[in-house]
Amino acid sequence: MKYKNYTLHNFRDLPQINNLSADEIEAIRVVGNVLPFKANNYVVEQLIDWNNVPNDPIFTLTFPRKEMLSKTHYSKVAKLLQTEEGPRLSQTFQDEINKIRLKLNPNPAGQEYNVPSFEGKKLHGIQHKYRETVLFFPSQGQTCHAYCTFCFRWPQFTGLKDLRFAMKEADLLHRYLLKHKKATDVLFTGGDPLTTKARVLATYIEPLLTKEFDHIQNIRIGSKVLGYWPYRFLTDSDADELLALFEKVNKAGKHLALQTHFNHPAELSTDVVKQAIDRIRNTGTQMRTQSPVMKNINDKPEIWATMWKEQVRLGLIPYYMFVARDTGSKSFFELPLVKAWNIFRKAYCSVSGIARTVRGPSMSCEPGKVQILGVSEVRGEKVFVLRFLQCRNPNLADIPFFAEYNPTATWLDDLKPAFGEKEFFFEKDNLIGKKTEEFNFSWE
Ligand SMILES: *Cc1c(COP(=O)(O)O)cnc(C)c1O
Ligand code: SF4
């Protein structure tokens, strides 16, 4: 199948749009001018149930809806649009839009702290937060086959150029990795790195297969291409070349893992996605899955249980359930932490051990990935029990810690230490204040 995308310029050509009201169509235009909007023929024709719009989960995942902006921002943009003429937006309009974007917390959780300096230069295409794993943002992969309305990487796709993470110098990545022998994993991310040509991807990956890079054991690719465009592995012109690259990595003795993003079981239901998964498995590549838990998309335990069971059946390993980050259209998607935990717990209870490889709900916060282990009571005080799944300081992972129970909290920032303490344990003694490479892991 040939890829065709739909953006603000041409979405009105879709016959399916007739299932929407005039207000809903207007919302696509208004919200879509602030947050990036892109859908494609696969998503529109095979994933969205148009009899169920606007509440259909995949419609909500890809098409802007009015509630995704605050009332104030919405009416402001709607008003500004009335005076815009022709396809080119005026400079005033763009300036106003960028002002709104900057109010939507475009770079959550202090990601800029993860950008390393190397050879006297900031490497804006790399994030190195957890010692073992280096994230790399190939500049050619800073787009996706469709855009998620919840995306926390949305500045990658808008005019906020200064906030983008991207790098095209494969050579710098390789030099960086040679200097960081404690890194065992490289995680290619984006956007979606699988929007790039196989040939380009090979320039980043193939050098890692040589003896010099023995310390790099795992090559990971974070991608939503199976959810948004499985034809990438079937009929795209370089599909075979991409699969051959995967096979080569595995044959070279590395572990190749696709960190695949599936937000809803509907994405696992088509014949093409199943064929694509089969072809990837045949190369020896392991697929692990992750998604945020979000109101209006997947806020029911049954949805998660179905998704994990189906993933296991198809040979994928459930890996992470995230709490959506505080950015963009967060208020439309956000859930109290206690609710997220209950969804996780109920889904977890209803699957066998083989699907309980999944961990969550997890918040990617500035100090690390914090998992909500649950709600408990200690000496009469109701508390959240938490732990780091990942931490800037590798010695702090897996240590339980406690926060005052708060039924409306949606992020770590909303929580206070339990038992009247002033700080969480990791806030003491500068335990995480250093740079990633300065921490020494100790077996003690
Ligand atoms: C999640 C994440 C990783 C990968 O963590 P794993 O637990 O090893 O999958 C690496 N770097 C950053 C910044 C992350 O947020
Ligand atoms: S696929 Fe990932 S990077 Fe792309 S829009 Fe969705 S969440 Fe963002």
Image (cartoon, rainbow, N blue to C red):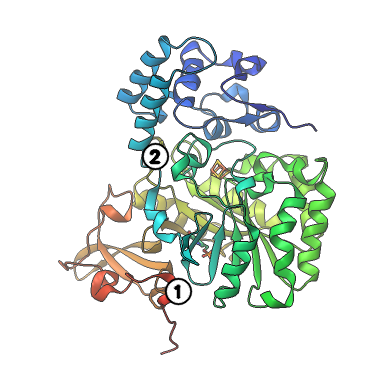
Q: Earlier in the sequence, mark 1 or mark 2?
A: 2
Query: Which residue does the numbered mark 2 point to in the structure image?
Result: 330
**SS of the residue under disc 2:** helix
Q: Residue at x 64, y 49 (%)?
A: 193
Find residue 410 and report its horizontal and vertical position in percent.
33, 48
Q: Assess disc 1: are there few (<14), some (14-19) or many (≥20) residues with their C-alpha within 10 Å of its C-alpha.
A: some
Q: Is residue 73 above or below residue 384?
A: above
Q: Assess disc 2: are there few (<14), some (14-19) or many (≥20) residues with their C-alpha within 10 Å of its C-alpha.
A: many
Q: Is residue 363 above or below residue 20?
A: below
Side of 138 where 412 appears, left or right: left
In this rendering, the label closer to the viewer, 1 or 2: 1
Find residue 99 and report its horizontal and vertical position in percent.
34, 31
Q: Residue at x 38, y 20 (%)?
A: 92
Task: Check disc 2 and give the amino acid type.
Answer: Lys
Mark 1 in CB contact with mark 2 (< 8 angstroms): no
Q: Is residue 305 above or below residue 66?
A: below
Side of 259 where 26 appears, left or right: left
Q: Residue at x 56, y 32 (%)?
A: 62
Side of 276 where 39 appears, left or right: left
Find residue 67 and report its horizontal and vertical position in percent.
40, 27
Side of 358 where 266 appears, left or right: right
Query: Which residue does the numbered mark 1 point to in the structure image?
Result: 437
Q: Is residue 49 above or below residue 355?
A: above
Task: Check disc 1 and give the amino acid type.
Answer: Glu
Q: Which sits in the foreground, 193 or 53?
A: 193
* Residue 186 at least partly seen: yes
Image quadrant holding the C terminus, namely: bottom left
**SS of the residue under disc 1:** helix
Place residue 217 in its image quadrant: bottom right
Q: What label does residue 36 carry, if any?
A: none
**Residue projecting furthest to the bottom:** 444
